[in-house]
Image (tube, rainbow, N blue to C red):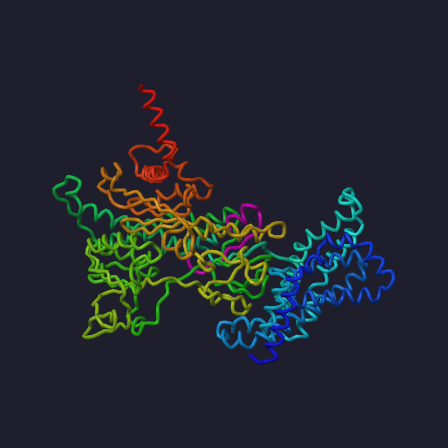
Amino acid sequence: MSRARIFILATIAVLVAAFFAFDLGQFLSLEYFKSQQAVIDAHVKTDPVASGALFFLIYVAVTGLSLPGAAIMTLAAGAIFGLAWGTVIVSFASSLGATLAFLASRFVLRDSIQTRFGDKLAAINAGIAKDGPFYLFTLRLVPAFPFFVINLVMGLTPLRTWTFYWVSQIGMLAGTTVYVNAGTEIAKIESLRGILSPGLIVSFTLLGIFPLAAKWIVNSIKARKVYAKWSKPARFDRNVVVIGAGSAGLVTAYIAAAVKAKVTLIEKHQMGGDCLNTGCVPSKALIRTAKLLSHIKRAPEFGIKSAHAEFDFADVMERVQRIIKTVEPHDSIERYRQLGVECITGDAKITSPWTVAVNGKTIATRNIVIAAGARPFIPPIPGLQEINPLTSDTLWSLRRLPRRLAVLGGGPIGSELAQCFARFGSEVTQVEMLPRLLIREDPEISQMVMRRFEAEGIKVLVNHKARQVLVENGQKLLVLENEGRESRVAFDELLCAVGRVANTSGYGLEELGIPVSKTRTVETNEFLQTVYPNIYACGDVAGPFQFTHTAAHQAWYAAVNALFGGIRKFKADYSVIPWATFTDPEVARVGMNEQEARQQGVAYEVTTYGIDDLDRAIADEEAHGVVKVLTVPGKDKILGATIVGEHAGDLLAEYVGAMRHGLGLNKILGTIHIYPTLTEANKYAAGVWKRAHQPRALLQWVERYHAWMRG
């Protein structure tokens, strides 16, 4: 650090230390001002110019050194100089002082900060270079941080000094005026009755509503900026156009029609989206048949000497299609048209913030909801594309059971389907590059599933990374790497289940400049709005969760905010999101588990109940699994619950309801559960918690009481 920087830093440090050492802050308090108000007023009347100049310099020093007291001085300026001159003095003094703090921060710290953290600050620097004045204006108008913090932090960025000054001057003017006006009223207080004066009430009302008004102004400016290059239609054909007829799109359209809005639903492929056609419905139908086969193989456990089943895999897959056809009317065009939704089959294209083109027709709409869903991700593994891998979208066309199946991915989709095909008789090898299956769950939960998989003949390869797919002598080979060693897995079909990626291209996002997040989903705010306030996104295309029930949950917020956001908007609530993996045993969870609590530094207690102790589970030959509940230390408030076992997804509903409505384990313990059912596991888990939190001192006295009663 240069001598000049050291000198400036030392000078600032000495001045700040002197301020606190000599308790100079007492002179910047409202109490001191009121006690000296008569003296100050007399001095101002005698020499107004000198008084104004002195006040100006003190204000510059306070803000330039980032000392506490600027807010009190702003109120004092109104009391001393009145609204007009007080506003002028404070406006220029605060901007000048802020600029001095900005320059000091820049001169002393910027070079070293940028040198040390330049790579991490690159994105911030780029944003400041592009929209720095607007960022600063927003912070000045609606301060998310104290002004002195803004001054110092902005000094570390590439923002030009002149830009910082004039934006600060304009941005702080409205707030300065409100505070100075409040100060003019404070000066008039002579007694406690003055507190109730209309002028003071109005002034402090302005202080209260100013942040709301400022936020509205900022949002209006943002909207004008983002819409600047587009021409808004004079009238609209629709209140909302929904792109995508999966779970999110269907619920959005349903709600819009229910409240009598004019809504158009556009789907380029199949109504019902992935859930109906390639996801939840077909996979659960396949899982049910596979589970029946597993029970037949377990016949001796149920007292049956032997049992076997003959099946044709083609018939199994035809059953899956029959299930889809049975559910299909729930999501059909006919049903939604009866509900009042205009349904169009075709490729939608957003051509402006208010227009959507489809089948050569342009629809003018006040709002747009993007519910375009997601698709399976195919990783760039050499040779993978050439063998045309199966995905959760395409495997439903299979009519011949693969003799050898390789499954890439140890998440929910890969795990569910790996177990299914193994139960049908395929030789299944499941490959996961991470240390265990179902990596989002706690380690012992993953182990329960892995043990069952291995017992059923699935070859589970964790810590193995797929490097290449080869075809040698007509045989397909998956080349793997584990701790530097190479191995090969022969297969007939390969199922790629390494995740899903949002559908964000091909329908106008790029042309409108709607950004995509790091997770490749459409970027939205807490109200599910994109950069265009009238364009919303929900479901898999928006994230952060890719579940059918979460998509429907988000759709309510998107629909209501789009149609009634001018009156009131609702922030999407992700506080209680449940999910289940439909392996055998099932794994269901809501809220935090142990690994997440540790990562987030959340204190917790763990209560576990082994389902192997449950009467109904024993009777059903399903005596395995666990109920695991995290609670606040010493309290019964539920932070999260994980259930592993038969019908875990159904059992979890009690914990979802409890968390959603603020009920604790004591309430679950006090609820009557039918005997014998699997749901008793929840009550017994609550009982385990209760026993661990017995009032031991009280029980000792109770024991003495009973002894006394016995004589």
Tell whether 126 sits left or right of 91. Answer: left
Is residue 255 shown in magenta? yes
Seen at 54% across and 61% down, the residue is 530
Tell whether 226 sits left or right of 434. Answer: right
Tell whether 376 sits left or right of 491. Answer: right
Closer to us: 90 or 267: 90
Residue 639 rendering spot, x and y as whole percentages: 42, 47
State the quadrant of the C terminus. Answer: top left
Closer to us: 127 or 139: 139
Residue most toward the right?
46
Q: Specify start and end residues of the magenta stretch as a single range.
A: 252-270
* Residue 535 figure quarter: bottom right
Residue most toward the top?
711
Residue most toward the front?
22
State the quadrant of the N terminus. Answer: bottom right
> What number of labels is visible?
0
Closer to us: 157 or 93: 93
Seen at 51% across and 77% down, the residue is 115
Is residue 82 shown in magenta? no
Residue 215 rendering spot, x and y as whole percentages: 64, 57
Tell whether 255 sits left or right of 443. Answer: right
Closer to us: 400 or 173: 173
645 w.r.t. 695: above or below: below
Residue 501 rendering spot, x and y as whole percentages: 41, 63
Q: Does residue 387 appear anywhere in the picture?
A: yes
* Residue 428 figure quarter: bottom left
Residue 134 rendering spot, x and y as whole percentages: 63, 67
253 w.r.t. 435: above or below: above
Seen at 69% across and 68% down, the residue is 97
Seen at 57% across and 74% down, the residue is 109
Q: Does residue 220 appear anywhere in the picture?
A: no
